Amino acid sequence: MKEGRGLADYHALIPDWEEFLAACARPLPLTIRINTLRATSEEVYKRLTGKGFSLSPIAWADALFTVDSARVSKTIEHWLGMFYIQEAVQTLPVCVLDPQPGETILDMAAAPGGKCTHIASRMRNRGPLIANEPVGKRQPALMGNINRLGVLNASVTSYRGESFPMHTHFDRVLLDAPCSAEGTIRKEPSLRDGATESTIARLSRLQRRLILRAYDLLKPGGTLVYSTCTFAPEENEGTVSYLLSERDALLGTIALTFSASEGITGWNGEEYAPEVSRCVRIYPHHIDSGGGFIAHIRRPA
């Protein structure tokens, strides 16, 4: 009996299949996101190149660079929180969320803090940011990164996401959901064998509970970004389609400055809401990074 769902199971879903396989087999580039709460891109570039590192800007993103050596994590600039080591694809959910200074924002599954600290930098430390992390052993990394990167507007909470209190409603919510993480295959080659069907089903059930609560926490007219780092349709379009069947949610289009794939509207005989084609799938060969899925969801005003 087949244990896991391997990459080959997604052959029919992924355009440019050979390019996809080739990208999955290459080492993942090391990328850093400049933390604009602590420094400018120009300052970090000058300091790191002066120490012998080679930095290359990423064309489609502000404040993102590839770096030639992992030794960059040992620098005083890293210790001072001038940058955060982060996969390029993992910066996209916050870009789609588009947080603004003065808003009230929730990061529903915040550890280890890459997206949370990115949100804070886009907010310029102005406006309440709730960084929620239910897993206790992940909280020290979250709080350490919040402190290192100079985030002043975040409060850390530890609620189960699906039962997050309804006392406050938010302008924007980020749900970077727990997932089977197939998109991180370039960091974890063992994922080539895939997650088991039972694991995918279990995660899908959790994601459905989380996305309902995330949506219910929005103010009228608010924005929810749902993201994962997996390829499994059940955890991506299936979860978003479930939300559309349960709530009056609206799916927005996502404008990217590079080529990506649209959401799929069916998988293994199950049909999803046609609107999920407005979601995006980013594969490793699109931007030489990991894989990801993003949905932009609005609550009617």
Image: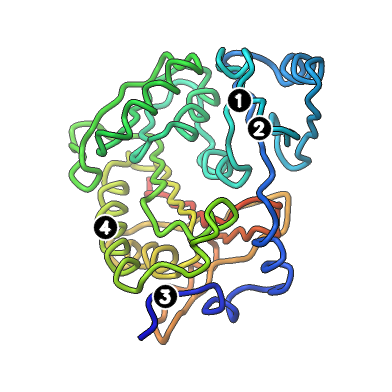
Q: In 3D space, how far apart are the residues under numbered discs 2 and 4 (Cα atoms)? A: 35 Å
Q: Find out whether the residues at labels 4 and 1 contact each other: C-beta distance under 8 Å.
A: no
Percent position (x, y) of residue 35?
60, 22
Q: In 3D space, how far apart are the residues under numbered discs 2 and 1 (Cα atoms)? A: 6 Å
**Residue 70, labelled with which disc?**
2
Which residue is tagged 1? 73
Q: Nearer the viewer, mark 3 or mark 4?
A: 4
The quadrant in which the C terminus is found is: top left
Q: Disc 4 or 1, which lies upstream in sequence?
A: 1
**Is 27 left or right of 223, judged from the image as shown?**
right
Percent position (x, y) of residue 202?
27, 65
Residue type of the residue flagged with mark 1: Ser
Which residue is tagged 3? 272
- As rendered, which of 28 and 206 lies closer to the eye? 28
Vertical position of residue 285 compared to residue 223: above or below: below
Residue type of the residue flagged with mark 3: Tyr
Residue type of the residue flagged with mark 4: Leu
